[in-house]
Every structure is written in structure tokens, then in C-alpha cells.
Amino acid sequence: MQIIVDEILVNYLISGHQSKKILLIHGWGTNLTSLQLLQNYFSKYYTVISVDLPGFGASGLPGRAWDNTDFANFIKNFLLKINYSQIDIIMAHSNGGAIAIEMVAKKMIKPKKLILIASAGIRTKFNKRNFVIRQIAHIFKIGSVVLPSGVRNNLKKKVYQKIGSDAFVQEAMLDSFKKVVAQDVTQDAKLITTPTLLIYGQNDQATPIEYGQILQRHILNAKLKILPNCGHFIYQDQPKQLINIIQEFLDV
């Protein structure tokens, strides 16, 4: 389904016909199909809403560089536009988790439960790394200008992968990416009293388990689960375990 929100053509999906509603928020560089496993499973018991954030999937690009506050305001406006402003549960992955934290902390949305899967948003401890990423990307942009386009693109992908940056996967959103990685959610996390489940993969290099430990200290009613043999994309590495942990949390 498609709709115009804030002058952007937006792609979204609603499945299930239950009274309780779940909002899914995908991470950076992915789209609503990345959380299809959760959509399919939980739509048996809930109405599940997912959306391609602007700049991703089949949604249009924003007209300027956005930060997570812009994405949060967009989701709020999107839910109002489709008449689903009351959400019972939020499930969010990676940078979608950072967006969800801001929305809940600022009471843009008031879910009964919050589930953050490999949530990003812990920036201050890793500002040096983010600075290095930006500087290497800038140096690379200057140094590679004389290379043929095909060689330049292949080299660019290798450089971004080497430094652990997912900016390359959505290059049109690079300016937004720079703004997003400069935002830290720890202060917002302190304002959250919603029962929260934090799920992290033991082998996650993009959002390490230290992120979950920091969020657990700041969010009043937070539980932290670490899944072994998992990287950043837990829903791919351990889908059954992930669903079982979420279901157990929702049943309480």
C-alpha cells in the first residue's frame, strides 16, 4: 500500500485484523521486508503495521538530510494519516530502535511495551569511531575522484565495509546517515518507563552487547537478553529463539 505523508510517497504494509496493534520499525539500509518474519508471525495475534522509512525500500527520498527526530516525526504523522495513532507494542531493529526510543521518551507514541532488537543509538562512547568513519569517507571521496566510476564504486564499497559503516548501502542518504550517527539516545532512554525488552546478538559488531547494557541501566523497566551465535541480524541468525523470547515477554 502507498500513501502521501509529509509530501513523500510512502510504502507500507498492514496485516492481521486484531484489536491490539504492533508497529515495526526497520533499521538503516533495510526496509519493511527485513522484518517480514515478525510481520507474518505476529499478524496471527495482532494487527501489524510496517513502513518503509523515507529513503528506503519503495518510499521516496526526503527533500533534505534527516536525523532521527525527523524520522520520529514522520512515523508520528504516518500513523495519524492511516488512523493508527494508538499503538500497543513497538518492535524496532537497529537504528529503528534509536527512533523508537526518541518517540517513546518524547511521548510521541505511548505503547504498552517496547521491544528493541540490536538497537543503535549509543553514540557518545563511540564518537571517535564515528569521527574516523566520516574522515575516511571524506578522504576517500577526494582521493578516488580520478578513478573510473566502476572501479571507484567497487573500491568505495570495500572501504565502507572495512570500517564497518553501512552508509554505502544507501548512498543517497549519506548526509542523513552523518546526522543520525551524531545523535545519542542515552538521555532519552532515561525518560522511558514503558516495559522494555532489549535483545542483542553475542557476536554483533555493529551494535555490540555493551549498547544493550547501557540501555538497560538507563531504562527503568528494561530486561536484557543476549542470544548466542547471533550477529546484528538476529531475525536471520536465530529466528525461532527471537520469536520465543518476544512471545514470552508479551505474555507477561
Image (cartoon, rainbow, N blue to C red):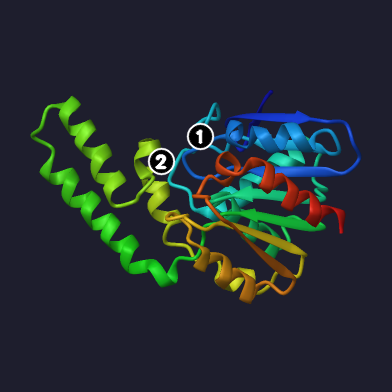
Q: Position of residue 214 (x, y in %)?
A: 56, 72
* Direction from residue 24 to residue 48 in the image, left or right: right
At label 1, the amino acid type is Phe
Q: Position of residue 198 (x, y in %)?
A: 65, 60
* Direction from residue 189 to residue 232 in the image, left or right: left
Query: Which callout, 2 or 1, points at the residue further toward the start of the chain?
Result: 1
The residue positioned 8% from the left and 34% from the top of the image is 146
Q: CA distance from mark 2 to mark 1?
A: 9 Å
* Mark sitting on residue 47: none
At label 2, the amino acid type is Met
Quadrant location of the N terminus?
top right
* Mark sitting on residue 173: 2
Point out the residue furthest to the top here: 1
**On screen, residue 92 above or below 169:** below
Neighbor class of circle 1 (other Cα within 10 Å; few <14, some 14-19, many 20+) is: many
Q: Are marks 2 and 1 in contact (CB under 8 Å)?
A: yes
Quadrant location of the C terminus?
bottom right
The residue positioned 77% from the left and 44% from the top of the image is 22
Point out the residue furthest to the right here: 19
Question: Nearest the camera: 5 or 176?
Answer: 176
Name the element at disc 2: helix
Q: Position of residue 228 (x, y in %)?
A: 56, 55
Residue at mark 1: 56
The residue positioned 49% from the left and 50% from the top of the image is 231
- Give the image quarter of residue 215: bottom right
